[in-house]
């Protein structure tokens, strides 16, 4: 009797020819994660993937808490792999059955030559649980616990659900994107959502020293560090010194256009970084009409400078929904740390909500003159994990 996890891959089933690429990436991630916590062997059982402990003292709870963070997994089951005799099956069932709960036995014979039919196995094991595990009763419609027994050619797996995965697609399988990463509540959630859809993210953060301090940089790095736990690898991140540009904008642009023009400069720089990193899209944490700068007109004004697809995964969400997601994924507590964001310092009193491209371009010309022709931004790149 060996302890194991059985892992279900969600949407991968739908991927046709690409499926093997997605599956291999996911399997590699699971193996790497398991190898970090103990000694395991791996085997595919039909559509599910088994991680089998080589020793009895394997810490499956620790493994579950890590595997849960891998995108592409829908359900994680926990149980035992045993030989096909009834005594061994019953011994496992006693290990997994919960006391004082309603249950249902769900048997499946992948090997139809197994002499006991599923229906009979359900009944026999059901009765065994009722008499052997205190406080249990059967509920076939809405049980608190489903005990699965699956019969294969050489073994049987007895298992119950241990955790829900996050779904989505394996990290990196959908290509690279640059993420405009502010350190607020929204942009980490937006990044996470694109990571969940299989994108590898490259966060780009603009800061304005000395107006913003080390604390705000540290906060952004902590957020990226947290997201790296979902990536399962280090995340290349860019930190762009935006002070010269921001001051030029403040000096040359009518106050109401400061935010839109700042965003257009950020967009250009982000796009340059995206091209150098072979990223194919730009992610922002904007939600329509959440603040004055995020109207359709203003978005158009910024999109105009992008030559890449702009992805706004939060565009239709309310702030409350974004906060809920931020709490779920663990970024909220870091995001609300009180640090100065570069944009908030330069935010106009009355921002234009319906920016007109021609007027914005006019204002922008003055900034470009102020910066001079050989203007170049300073940045640093770091691998964060
Ligand atoms: P967030 O919570 O992500 O800061 P927000 O509601 O504060 O969002 P804005 O400050 O208007 O909204 O920013 C809108 C988007 O612009 C952000 O979600 C982010 O994608 C990008 N952005 C804003 N400030 C920065 C910055 N300093 N560095 C990089 N991107 C930024
Ligand atoms: Mg912000």
Image: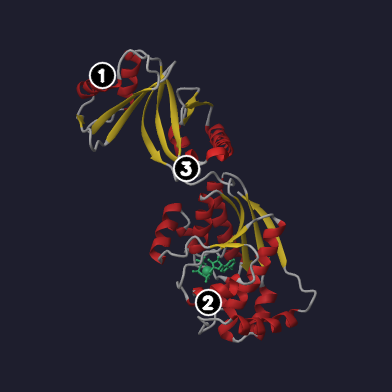
Quarter of the rendered image showing ligand 1? bottom right
Residue drawn at x 65%, y 55% is 279
SS at mark 1 in the image: helix
Label 3: element kind: helix
Determine crowd level at label 1: few under 14, some 14-19, many 20+ residues with C-alpha closer than 10 A. Answer: few
Q: Is residue 305 left or right of residue 292?
A: right
The reply to whether discs 2 and 3 touch (Cβ–Cβ < 8 Å) is no
Is residue 344 left or right of 93 when viewed as pictured? right
Q: Could you tell me if the residues under marks 3 and 1 are in contact, i.e. CB atoms within 8 Å?
A: no
Q: CA distance from mark 1 to mark 2?
A: 66 Å
Instruction: Identify whether 24 is placed above or below 39.
Output: below
Residue bearing the label numbered 2: 297
Residue 247: give its label: none
Q: Residues within 10 Å of mark 3 (few under 14, many from 20)?
A: some
Q: Are marks 1 and 2 in contact (CB under 8 Å)?
A: no
Say if 240 sits above or below 298 in the image. above
Q: Is residue 314 above or below residue 345?
A: above
Residue positioned most to the right: 374
| Residue at disc 3, CB closer than 8 Å to ligand 1 | no
Determine which quarter of the picture holds residue 289. Answer: bottom left
| Viewer-closest of 231 and 9 | 9
Distance between mark 2 and mark 3 Cα atoms: 36 Å
Classify mark 2: residues with Cα within 10 Å, few (<14), some (14-19) or many (20+): some
Quadrant in the picture for the N terminus? top left
Residue 200 coordinates in the image, percent (x, y): 60, 51
The residue beneath circle 3 is 11
How many labels, in total? 3
In this orientation, which residue lies closer to the viewer: 143 or 97?
143
Identify the residue under disc 1. Answer: 120
Can residue 209 be seen in this snapshot?
A: no
Q: x, y percentage for residue 276?
A: 72, 58
């Amino acid at each position: 009797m060996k302890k194991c996890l059985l892992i279900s891959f969600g949407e991968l089933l739908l991927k046709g020819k690409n499926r093997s690429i997605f599956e291999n990436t996911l399997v590699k991630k699971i193996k790497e994660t398991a190898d970090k916590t103990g000694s395991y062997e791996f085997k595919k059982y039909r559509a599910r993937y088994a991680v089998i402990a080589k020793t009895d003292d394997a810490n499956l709870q620790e493994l579950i808490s890590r595997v849960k963070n891998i995108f592409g997994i829908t359900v994680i089951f926990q149980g035992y792999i045993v030989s096909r005799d009834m005594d061994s099956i019953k011994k496992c069932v006693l290990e997994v059955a919960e006391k004082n709960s309603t249950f249902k036995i769900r048997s499946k014979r992948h090997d139809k030559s197994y002499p006991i039919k599923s229906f009979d196995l359900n009944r026999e094991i059901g009765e065994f649980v009722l008499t052997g595990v205190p406080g249990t009763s059967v509920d076939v419609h809405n049980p608190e616990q489903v005990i699965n027994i699956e019969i294969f050619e050489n073994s049987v797996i007895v298992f119950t659900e241990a955790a829900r995965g996050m779904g989505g697609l394996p990290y990196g399988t959908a290509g690279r994107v640059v993420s405009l990463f502010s350190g607020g509540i929204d942009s980490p959630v937006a990044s996470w959502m694109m990571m969940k859809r299989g994108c590898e993210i490259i966060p780009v953060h603009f800061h304005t020293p000395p107006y913003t301090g080390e604390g705000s940089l540290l906060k952004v790095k902590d957020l990226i560090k947290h997201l790296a736990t979902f990536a399962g690898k280090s995340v290349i991140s860019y930190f762009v010194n935006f002070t010269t540009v921001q001051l030029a904008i403040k000096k040359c642009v009518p106050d109401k256009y400061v935010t839109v023009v700042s965003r257009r400069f950020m967009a250009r720089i982000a796009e340059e970084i995206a091209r150098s990193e072979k990223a194919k899209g730009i992610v922002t944490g904007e939600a329509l009409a959440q603040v004055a700068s995020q109207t359709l007109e203003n978005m158009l004004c910024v999109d105009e400078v992008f030559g890449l697809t702009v992805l706004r995964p939060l565009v239709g969400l309310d702030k409350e929904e974004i906060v809920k997601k931020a709490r779920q994924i663990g970024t909220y507590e870091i995001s609300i740390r009180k640090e100065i964001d570069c944009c908030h310092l330069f935010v106009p009193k009355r921002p234009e909500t319906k920016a007109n491209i021609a007027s914005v371009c006019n204002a922008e010309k003055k900034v470009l003159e102020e910066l001079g022709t050989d203007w170049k931004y300073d940045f640093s790149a770091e691998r964060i994990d």
